[in-house]
Image: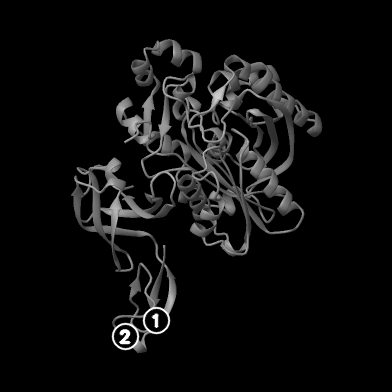
Amino acid sequence: MVGTKCKTCGKVFFPPRSVCPHCRRNGKIVEYKCSGKGEVLTFSVIHSASDQYAAMKPYVLAIVELEEGTRMTTQIICEPEEVYIGMPVKSVFRVLDREGTEGIIHYGTKFVPNLA
Amino acid sequence: MVGIITYGAYIPRYRIKVEEIARVWGGNAAEITGGLGVIEKAVPDYDEDTATFAVEATRSALCRRIVDPKEIKAIYVGSESHPYAVKPTSVTVGEAIGATPVMTAADYEFACKAGTAGIQTAMGLVGAGMMNYAIAIGADTAQGAPGDALEYTAAAGGAAYVIGNDDPIAVISHTCSFSTDTPDFWRREGADYPRHGGRFSGEPGYFKHVIGAAKMMLADMGTKPSDYDYAVFHQPNAKFPQKAAARLGFSQDQIKTGLLVSRLGNTYSGAVPLGLAAVLDVAKPGDKIFITSYGSGSGSDAFDITVTDAIHDKIDRSRGPTVDAMLADAKYLDYAVYARHKGKIKT
């Protein structure tokens, strides 16, 4: 997971930002590799999904706070009854969506429980 | 000496039992399980495919040992279930590990032996001094038509090998191959599922090539089966590798660590790479490993491998999940949910 970090204030951004919203012109943005570890800040269980995600329902959508402090909305791959606020999670590489049977396949980051 | 710098494996969490598949298709579960020696098989999640297995296995390898991704100049992914018919899986892996853009990459296909063919290519590039590191991956989400004999075993998973020559954890002393045009198993462009020649895939397919390559290796190296601590053979079921081992003079004890098929199923291009990963999970310096893959169509690649002290000093195996731990972390599906997972139900 490659994000960015503002060397002026130390804040980490994922997805990467090219300008620090806090320091603005005084910010100095550099590439930063996130650990991929964090915890569930809050979550929702999706029972009524759009067509491309229908096969996965019910699934867990959460806001995850990474160790570096940045937050992102992401899917947690687990049963809906397993997830809880504060659950430690780690990033995995998965298919995000497929444009039908003939279009592009989008890959990216999702999260799984990191209980071990 | 060229060898394995680090390795990683990936097995999805879901499983279906052979008896559950037999229940749906009216098969005799005890007869099928007994005949194949397979109890259950690994099934991918909805959002998993060969590319996600390849990335997870490679990341696990790079967690175990720090290798500068910019020094990785080649990536080969062997599979018969690449997500695209045209567009390489290997560059997806390259991007995910930060090895792009100064690298070469290509996808391989040779039924179940495309992963070991990738290892041979990586050995050649490193051995020729063209690069420090090359990655070879064998991974598959194997397909079997509903109700076909293949459906009982067609499984999912893969393993990745970083090949190089600075302090390898295992030296690959020699590799040799035995290949002929033998149409025992195939899938035409656009077909969803492979077809096969049934029993024809045994003697003229699997046994001729596996035994051909294995005997060539023993002759080339001047070794005998008892010189090896472990042996891994391609494992479409449990019977074939046990029979091949017995014919060659390897004991059941030598093959048991790398024989995963009864709990994993046949992961096609992932099968021998995963079997070798299971051996490396427990191997100690000095152990000798004999490998022979098989890909229908047909060919076998054999390898003579010796584990070095670097397996203790240069790599932290605990930083990646072991094959055994991933096999133990199983979640069972019934046939209906399995069919949904595999996309066998079209919506």
Which disc number belongs to residue B286?
none
Q: Nearer the viewer, residue B101 or A106?
A: A106
Q: Which residue is mark 1?
A: A7
Q: In x, y percent, where is residue B232?
A: 61, 30
Disc 2 on helix, strand or loop?
A: loop
Circle 1 chain: A
Q: Residue at x 80, y 29 (%)?
A: B219
Q: Residue at 30%, 80% (x, y): give it.
A: A21
Image position of B297 (left or right of A55): right
Residue B36 versus residue A93 in the image, above or below: above
Image height check: is B257 above or below A102? above
Residue drawn at x 46%, y 51% is B319
Closer to the camera: disc 2 or disc 1?
2
Q: Are marks 2 and 1 on the same chain?
A: yes
Q: Which residue is mark 2?
A: A23
**Above or below for A9 versus A98:** below
> Which quadrant of the structure image shows residue B113?
top right
Q: Amino acid at mark 2?
A: Cys
The crowd level at tag 1 (other Cα within 10 Å; few <14, some 14-19, many 20+) is: some
x then y, percent, for residue B143 = 48, 31
User: Quadrant of residue B137 in the image?
Assistant: top right
Task: Calculate the distance from the C-alpha at mark 2 to the C-alpha at mark 1.
Answer: 10 Å
Earlier-in-chain disc, 2 versus 1? 1
SS assignment at label 1 = loop
Q: Where is residue B245 drawn, in percent x and y?
A: 64, 21
| Quadrant in which the N terminus of chain A appears | bottom left
Q: Quadrant of residue A17?
A: bottom left
